[in-house]
């Protein structure tokens, strides 16, 4: 059905395998374009995008510890630190 394909990364120019399993996954998700970057370049791009986000400090509504969030906190909704948020999800 699917066969491994060798593709060339648009960032670094190295060849990388677009495996049969990856092709099947792309088809299941309805993705029509093959990846244009190798795994290392995709990872580096994701890290760069994450680093560009600005984080904001606020106080946890439950325990009072400092919480860091990727959005501007509003006073009309409670904000929780990671631990308290995880406790609320269970």
Image (tube, grey):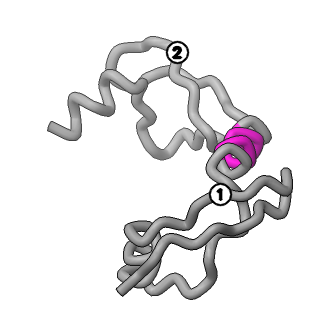
Label 2 vs 1, first from the N-terminus: 1
What residue is disc 2 on?
Answer: 66
Observer-nearest residue: 10 or 51? Answer: 10
Say which residue appears at 85% left-offset and 56% top-offset. Answer: 13
Q: Quadrant of residue 65?
A: top left
Say which residue appears at 63% left-offset and 24% top-offset. Answer: 57
Dot 1 lies on which element? strand
Say which residue appears at 33% left-offset and 22% top-offset. Answer: 83
Q: In the displayed structure, does residue 21 sit left or right of residue 53?
A: left
Q: Which mark is residue 16?
A: 1
Q: Position of residue 44 (x, y in %)?
A: 72, 42
What range of the chain is rendered magenta? 43-50
Q: In the displayed structure, does residue 6 sit left or right of residue 54?
A: left
Observer-nearest residue: 43 or 3? Answer: 3
Q: Which mark is residue 76?
A: none
Q: Quadrant of residue 72?
A: top right
Say which residue appears at 65% left-offset and 57% top-offset. Answer: 16
Please check the rendered image and state whether residue 44 is part of the magenta-colored stretch, yes or no.
yes
Quarter of the C terminus within the rendering: top left
Q: Position of residue 80 (x, y in %)?
A: 40, 30
Q: Is residue 49 above or below residue 31?
A: above
């Amino acid at each position: 059905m699917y066969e491994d394909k060798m593709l060339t990364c648009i960032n670094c120019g190295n060849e990388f395998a677009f495996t049969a399993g990856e092709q099947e996954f792309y088809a299941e998700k309805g993705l029509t374009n093959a990846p244009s970057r190798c795994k290392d370049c995709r990872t580096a791009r994701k890290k760069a995008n994450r680093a560009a986000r600005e984080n904001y400090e606020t106080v946890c509504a439950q325990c009072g510890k400092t919480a860091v969030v990727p959005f501007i906190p509003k006073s009309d909704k409670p904000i929780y630190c990671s631990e308290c948020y995880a406790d609320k999800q269970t």
